[in-house]
Image: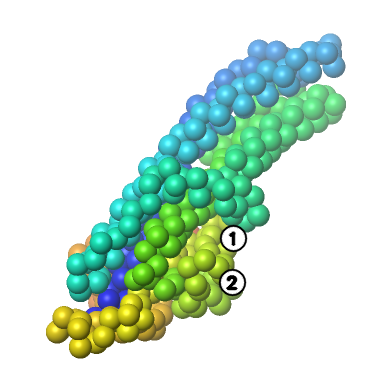
Amino acid sequence: MATANEEALDASVRHQIGILRYSSSVVRKVVSLLNKVDDRLVNEIARRGVGDQGFTQRRLELLLDSVRAIIAEAYGKATTALNDELKDLSTYERDFQLNMLGRSIPVRFDFIKPTSAQLYAAVTARPFNGLLLRDWYKDLEAGAYRRLRDSIRMGYVEGRTTDQIVRDIRGTRAQRYKDGILEISRRGAEATVRTAINHTATVARNETYKANSDVIKGVVWVATLDHRTTAVCRGRDGKVYPLDSGPRPPAHINCRSSTAPVLKSWKEMGINLKEAPEGTRASMDGQVPASMTYSDWLRKQPKEVQDDILGVAKAKLFRSGGLTLDRFVDAKGHEYTLAELAKRESEAFAKAGIDR
Ligand SMILES: [Zn+2]
């Protein structure tokens, strides 16, 4: 039978997968809010004819003022939307944790529930990667404006046409707009969203644990162990930290690490083993479960969980084709499509009985 700490770790790993998926959905929401103003920006630049003969320094300054206002409005909307998500997430995380703790501990226990306001206050008061949330927001907006300003100014000074300047900014359709200045800002926003979500979940979780330090003695660092994992997170994986000190994820931008609770033993809770309900005595042993790679963890999950996480075909390759998880991604961490995989891993496809 799994101990309470093993159950909590297992549930925490699965929960982190959910958090990462949620991150992707918030990224889409925030990026689409930012994308909405791209046309406005481009129209403004085109309308004012920055590349025209006789365009003056004075007109350039007016254009930049206008660009600054458009950017401020877009980032205001995007960060407000993100803030709303983070508020909801901190409350959700608390409820998830209390629920999970209730299921992991073999006896009924009255947990203390920090208020949503307390949780969100902690989220905004604690820096991650050296900056507070509001400073991350400021940096994003300032960076987005600065890149546009520099690009427009350079274009003006170098005598580029309006079309060329617009192309520098928006990128080309042939490259799916990945080659424009705006793409850099989009990628920055995406990284900030993902990192802020990890930070928010981690802080809300930790505040919830701190409120229940009668039962919880620390947290264990849980890295997503695959070949994309950074050295710092790999090194911290499985390490236990007290509730009120030590490092916490995110350890870096785009960090996927998480934490799981370490529950006290009966003895550490001040309960004589003989007083503990029979059948639950071995469960609360206070031990930290051995860490395992994500591949090991997924191997132990039921078929439905594997199908859900990998998709049906890839789950088959994982189960019956002999493929470890690192074979599904390239060196940069991008997932191969099924067609790409079929070319690279034809043996595994044959073994799993998948026709391509
Ligand atoms: Zn990390």
| Amino acid type of the residue that numbered disc 1 sits on in the rendered structure | His
Q: Position of residue 348 (x, y in %)?
A: 32, 75
Residue contact at pointers 1 and 2, CB within 8 angstroms: yes
| Residue denoted by label 2 | 232
The kind of secondary structure element at disc 1 is: loop
The verdict on label 2 being within 8 Å of ligand 1 is yes
Say left or right for 314 vs 192: left
Residue 16: image location, x then y, percent: 38, 61
Would you say 278 lies left or right of 326 here? left
Which sits in the foreground, 356 or 106?
106
Q: Name the quadrant containing residue 272.
A: bottom left
Residue 57 locus on image (x, y percent): 85, 16
Query: Can you see residue 50?
Result: yes
Local packing at callout 2 (Cα closer than 10 Å; few below 14, some 14-19, many 20+) is: few
Residue drawn at (50%, 45%) of the image: 121
Residue 103 higher or lower than 200, as above or below: below
Q: Is residue 335 visible?
A: no
- Residue bearing the label numbered 1: 252
Q: Quadrant of the C terminus?
A: bottom left
- At x 38%, y 74%, the residue is 262
Dot 1 beta carbon under 8 Å from ligand 1? yes
Residue 72: give x, y in percent of width and height. Answer: 62, 26
Q: Secondary structure at mark 2?
A: helix
Q: In the image, is residue 187 above or below residue 316?
A: above
| Front position in the image: 234 or 219 | 219
For the N terminus, the quadrant is bottom left
